[in-house]
Amino acid sequence: WGRLLGVEQAVVESVCLDAGVVVVSVRPLRWARGRCGVCQRRCAGYDAGRGRRRWRSLDVGVWRVFLEADAPRVRCLVHGVVVASVPWARHGAGHTRQFDALVGWLVRRMSKTAVCHLVRVGWRTVGQIVARVVADADAAAGDRLAGVTRIGIDEVSYRRGHKYLTVVVDHDTRRLLWIAEGRDSATLSQFFELLGPDRCAKVSLVTADGAEWIFSAVSRYCPRARICLDPFHVVMWAGKALDAV
């Protein structure tokens, strides 16, 4: 059962059926107990907390699975009294890391509504899981803006009624650098303010469409950068000119 559910650094004590779900009782290994849920430092015990609690895990067939374990509290010198860390879930989460990873993968490839139906969780829960996964990815990636020299800027519509997001990508790493709600020079200026004057001076190339708000922001913050128009708009403008002729 431990291998089946991907439960690491823990001992499976029992497995039972409870109200139509599979409940797997587990306990952390000795060296993984008594650690702060925030910083992972070993701490002195405080109390038993609210007793045993459950974490949603990966389904087994059509059966929903929950891990159940004690949730004592510890006293951390930095973070005060907090619930002790468990190796199978993030601090404050009601789902295991494997479950979070599955939802994080699914939301990149299907709609949020479809994910809710597939894994049988609520709309808000999917959003909370995505926030946890992204936060860990950002922490692991470090400074995404370090060494940026060639970027692409565009907007994407995410809702009817002209709701847009401004998107900035790194052409060298092919990764998303920054995204924010809005489609104007003030919105894009937030990215360049975050980038800082030293790193803005190192930007050598910016790809974009013909939007004036992009040109004005780039010219103000990155005067040394070459602006390259994307082929789609170049061909479109050429086609319109040819039709006019």
Image (cartoon, grey):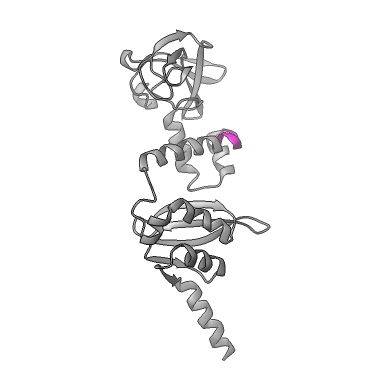
Of residues 194 and 104, which is closer to you in this image?
194
* Magenta region includes residue 125: yes
Image position, residue 34 (x, y; %): 38, 14
Q: Residue furthest front?
A: 197
Relative placement, left or right, of 109 versus 114 is left
Question: The N terminus lies in which quarter of the figure?
Answer: top left
Q: In which image quadrant can residue 15 be found?
A: top left
Give the residue displayed 53% in from the left and 21% down from the top: 21
User: Magenta residues?
Assistant: 121-126
Of residues 76 and 54, which is closer to you in this image?
76
Task: State the predominant SS element of the stretch in magenta.
Answer: helix
Q: Is 127 drawn above or below residue 180 in the view shown?
A: above
Image position, residue 189 (x, y; %): 52, 57
Give the residue displayed 37% in from the left and 24% down from the top: 7
Q: Residue furthest bottom?
A: 245
Q: Is 140 drawn above or below residue 21 in the view shown?
A: below
Q: Residue furthest right?
A: 161
Relative placement, left or right, of 27 versus 232 is left
Image position, residue 95 (x, y; %): 49, 27
* Magenta region includes residue 191: no
Q: In which image quadrant can residue 142 be found?
A: top left
Of residues 158 and 141, which is closer to you in this image?
141
Relative placement, left or right, of 107 versus 77 is right
